[in-house]
Amino acid sequence: MLYGLACLFPYLIGIYLIFELKVDITYTIINILGLTLVLMLLGALMIETFARRLRLLARRVALTVHDGATEKIPMKDNDLEEVYTLTRDFNAIVEELEEHKTHSKKITARMLSYVNDLDAYEKKFRDESLIRANLSRYVGEDVVEELIRSEKPAFENVECTATILFADIRRFTTVSEHMDPHEIIAMLNDYFSTMVPIIFKHDGVLDKFVGDELMAVFRDRPYGERAPYRAIQAAVEMIDTLEKMKTSRGDDYSKLEVGIGINTGMVVIGNVGSENRKDYTAIGDTVNVAARFEQIASGQEIIVGEETYRICKEKVPMKETGEIILKNRNAPVRGYKVIGKGEHT
């Protein structure tokens, strides 16, 4: 607006010269005034164009600062050098902002991926800790590690060869009849707390407790001794340990004796039970025969089946007990007694 008023100034001078000073109007004066008008209009147009470009640049800068917009300003070759330079520098800044935004998106996506991974690792750690806590009640730490690292399901139903061990305290009712319930529970907990680590030590799996009886399962491993031999080792150590307990624990333990039955053969290991409650256990004739061997074993005696004897006879001294007729079984089976210290074949 000020520039428009300035354009009128030469004409005001011309009017003053003509009407006040009575200057003659010549073509030269007319041409000068016309040329002046044209130049003034061209200047106004240039200034308006310059101002429009500056206003556009200012708006884009404001949008970029406040809203994070990254829209560039079109470059024009006929821009004044200063406007051209400002536009070029602004567009360069916008390009850098776009690069930073793209980089930030990548970093954000990567961080979200890391967070998801951490959540997955945390869940896996919680699940693994729960599995580890549950498994450690039934197997030793080395077996727990093997099961957790295994890609196969740890509790799938499987038919396999296994060695079953049953151990039962002889005449426990008679031994404990003078004890109150709290003392009986304390004695059983002490007994099982001592015997279960022996099972784990020899890579056995604790199957279950039934009163004062325990059942364990031994399977062949890719390394180390065969399952039947480890089961006999565990049984011998259980009897030796009980002898030491009888000496160190006092009168309540003095009459404790354990009978152990061991048998090797095909079993099915899997989840058995109802929809609401299941046990992961071994079933089959091999299990039944091992249980019958345990029932006929005397105190501090280990009786094993024929397959167990065949595998271990070169390492473990044993003697045949002859054919045994087991309850609820038509065909007799051969049993073999593990010879302990002081015994002879």
Image (cartoon, rainbow, N blue to C red):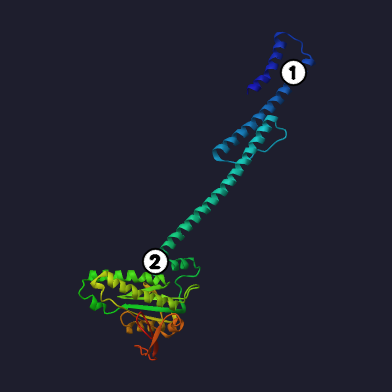
What residue does disc 2 label?
134
Residue 4 is situated, as x and y percent measured from the top left of the image, at: 66, 22
The reply to whether residue 37 is in sight is: yes
The kind of secondary structure element at disc 2 is: helix
* Residue at x 66% of width, y 28% of height: 48
* Image x and y of residue 50, in percent: 67, 29
Q: Residue 176 vs residue 209: left or right?
A: left
Three-letter code, disc 1 = Leu
- Tell me, for residue 263, which label it has, or none: none
Q: Residue 2 occupies which quadrant of the picture? A: top right
Q: Nearer the viewer, residue 300 or 188?
A: 300
- Quarter of the figure with the C terminus: bottom left
Instruction: State yes or no: discs 1 and 2 in contact (Cβ < 8 Å).
Output: no
Q: What kind of element bears circle 1?
A: helix
Q: Is residue 37 above or below residue 104?
A: above
* Residue at x-position 43% and y-position 83%: 309
Q: Which mark is residue 33?
A: 1
For label 1, count other residues whose C-alpha is less than 10 Å away and answer few (under 14), some (14-19) or many (20+).
some
> Which residue ends up furthest to the left in the rendered image?
178
Classify 51 as above or below 274. above
Q: Quadrant of the N terminus?
A: top right
Q: Position of residue 180 (x, y in %)?
A: 21, 71
Out of 250 and 25, give the one closest to the viewer. 250
Amino acid identity at mark 2: Asn
